[in-house]
């Protein structure tokens, strides 16, 4: 594996963002807009004394962590789609870059995009609503890490689908994560879901993360069992996501789809 | 790796896409320093053959060795010594020429990138374009930049799909001269797919005409013209292409 080739991919995206202010704006626009909306809602709920413990931190913390998951997933997909849109995918695949290096490069770009968007949200939450997410302490790293990995896995899944079925499937890049939102218990506990849906919810690493975040905010304790559950599930998600991408890559080579993607 | 091995050896290559036989039992080879033309009408199987050599498409059957190696098993080693250019691929439009070439230099592990780019861009006459966005260039300028990308790693095997398509005669001539001098300088083998028969006659040492995925004839341009008793290669091409309609 060559770090130089992996960083070359990351550098290509750095150049792209450096020279395009609309892309930079897009990177922070949606996170900032959602934080603004949820921030006002949280303040209002606090004003009317809604019987919820730590209403501002719970909502804003959940929103920021949800955005970490979303940005991580969309970051991986965008790194791939940028190559498709610029008809650069063939050039990359006929270079000595291996499919594994390509995947790692995509994940790296996904993380960088996530960090940029999260930084904007964290800053706004602190300045406008007095919410400091870093007060969560070290567990925040565990929450971030798990959500980033889950985002990678879903991103690889979508990338594999676009590789196989073409650009017609690219809207999945934006849509698929919202399938996970209701069952990930982002803004409410898993117990709020219907009984039959709860096993599905617990099958997502995100549900354990958000339950863990609420436990930490409400009782000040970090639930190690939830953390380990999320790690184990993420191991499975990542293996499945990567295997699916590799399988789709193999099928795309068999059926000549690498040549036609982007046309 | 045997340095004197045939650069490319293809034996009985077949590619079937469901009901379509894109390449049908094709065999050929390319020697070091040779310019080899892969000729045929649209849909004859040229692009599929090139894509298989590049590892973009897996063959249904047949054997391929490049630099004496199985490209499937030694993908990275083989691709490090190859490169490719085609009008149906592009470079990111929002990146400058310099940024694009730097990224590819990194992907190909080029040492002394700056001096390599100075040398290459000087020869192709694109030094003044380095700071411009790729998307702002004319099609002739884009083609020269694409050729620079294809030569960035000083490949021993260069695959060119329609290298002068849509270029004006002046730029097309410059591109041909550049390729010929690259071959002279490095002793590289070049596989060219083209519809420009004059170009093929001028630059190719040997060539092969494909029809419906099958080899129709192989030889030097002169020997093929004399075998068909026509005045030029274009007449041979038309004769072969129209024979299927009979």
Image (cartoon, rainbow, N blue to C red):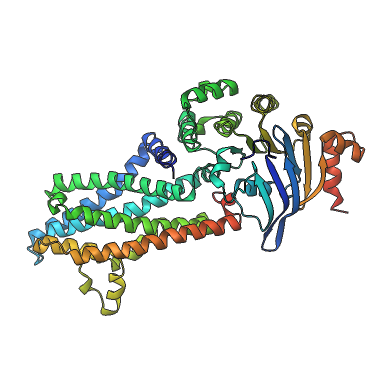
Image-quadrant location for residue B80: top right
Question: In the image, what residue occupies the spot 9% across and 65% down?
Answer: A50
The number of numbered badges drawn on the structure is 0
Q: Residue furthest toward the right?
A: B229
Asked if residue A15 is positioned above or below residue A237 in the image, the reply reads above
Asked if residue B7 is positioned above or below residue B119 in the image, the reply reads below
Q: Nearer the viewer, residue B27 or A53?
A: B27
Q: Nearer the viewer, residue B190 or A130?
A: B190
Asked if residue A194 is positioned above or below residue B10 in the image, the reply reads below
Q: Quadrant of the N terminus of chain A?
A: top left
Image-quadrant location for residue A57: bottom left
Image-quadrant location for residue B142: top right
The x, y position of residue B29, in whole percent, is 73, 43
In this image, A97 relative to B48: left or right?
left
Question: In the image, what residue occupies the spot 8% across and 62% down?
Answer: A48
In this image, A187 relative to A219: left or right?
right
Q: Residue furthest toward the bottom?
A: A196
The x, y position of residue B213, in whole percent, is 75, 52
Report whether residue A232 is seen.
Answer: yes
The x, y position of residue B140, in whole percent, is 61, 29
The x, y position of residue B23, in whole percent, is 72, 53
Q: Residue furthest toward the front?
A: B2
Report whether residue A206 is seen.
Answer: no
């Amino acid at each position: 594996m060559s770090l130089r080739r992996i960083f070359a991919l990351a550098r290509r995206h750095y150049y792209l963002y450096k020279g395009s202010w609309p892309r930079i704006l897009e990177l922070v626009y949606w996170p900032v807009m959602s934080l603004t909306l949820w921030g006002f809602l949280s303040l209002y709920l606090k004003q009317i004394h809604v019987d919820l413990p730590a209403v501002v931190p719970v909502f804003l913390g959940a929103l920021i962590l949800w955005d970490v998951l979303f940005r991580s997933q969309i970051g991986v997909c965008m790194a791939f789609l940028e190559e498709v849109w610029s008809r650069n995918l063939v050039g990359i695949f006929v270079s000595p870059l291996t499919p594994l290096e390509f995947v790692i490069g995509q994940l790296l770009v996904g993380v960088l995009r996530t960090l940029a968007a999260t930084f904007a949200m964290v800053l706004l939450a602190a300045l406008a609503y007095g919410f400091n997410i870093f007060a969560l302490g070290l567990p925040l790293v565990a929450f971030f890490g798990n959500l980033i990995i889950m985002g990678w896995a879903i991103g690889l899944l979508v990338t594999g689908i676009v590789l196989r079925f073409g650009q017609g499937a690219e809207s999945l890049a934006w849509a698929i994560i919202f399938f996970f939102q209701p069952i990930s218990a982002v803004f409410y506990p898993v117990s709020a879901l219907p009984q039959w849906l709860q096993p599905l919810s617990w099958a997502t690493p995100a549900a354990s993360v958000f339950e863990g975040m609420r436990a930490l905010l409400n009782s000040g304790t970090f639930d190690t069992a939830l953390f380990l559950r999320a790690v184990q599930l993420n191991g499975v998600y990542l293996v499945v996501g990567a295997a699916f991408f590799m399988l789709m890559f193999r099928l795309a080579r068999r059926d000549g789809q690498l040549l036609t993607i982007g046309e | 790796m045997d340095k004197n091995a045939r650069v490319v050896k293809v034996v009985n290559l077949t590619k079937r896409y469901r009901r379509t036989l894109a390449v049908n039992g094709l065999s050929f080879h390319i020697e070091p320093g040779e310019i080899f033309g892969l000729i045929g009408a649209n849909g004859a199987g040229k692009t599929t053959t090139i894509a298989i050599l590049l590892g973009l498409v897996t063959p249904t059957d047949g054997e391929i060795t490049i630099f004496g190696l199985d490209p499937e098993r030694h993908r990275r080693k083989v691709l490090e010594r190859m490169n490719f250019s085609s009008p149906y691929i592009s470079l990111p439009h929002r990146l400058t020429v310099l940024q694009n070439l730097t990224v590819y230099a990194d992907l190909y592990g080029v040492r002394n990138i700056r001096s390599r780019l100075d040398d290459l861009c000087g020869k192709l006459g694109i030094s003044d374009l380095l700071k411009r966005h790729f998307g702002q260039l004319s099609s002739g300028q884009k083609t020269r930049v694409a050729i620079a990308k294809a030569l960035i790693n000083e490949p021993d095997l260069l695959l060119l799909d329609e290298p002068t398509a849509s270029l004006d005669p002046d730029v097309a001539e410059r591109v041909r001269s550049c390729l010929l001098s690259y071959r002279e300088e490095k002793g590289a083998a070049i596989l060219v797919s083209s519809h420009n028969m004059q170009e093929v006659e001028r630059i190719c040492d040997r060539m092969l005409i494909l029809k419906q995925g099958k080899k129709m004839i192989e030889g030097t341009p002169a020997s093929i013209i004399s075998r068909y008793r026509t005045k030029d290669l274009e007449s041979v091409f038309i004769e072969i292409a129209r024979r299927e309609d009979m």
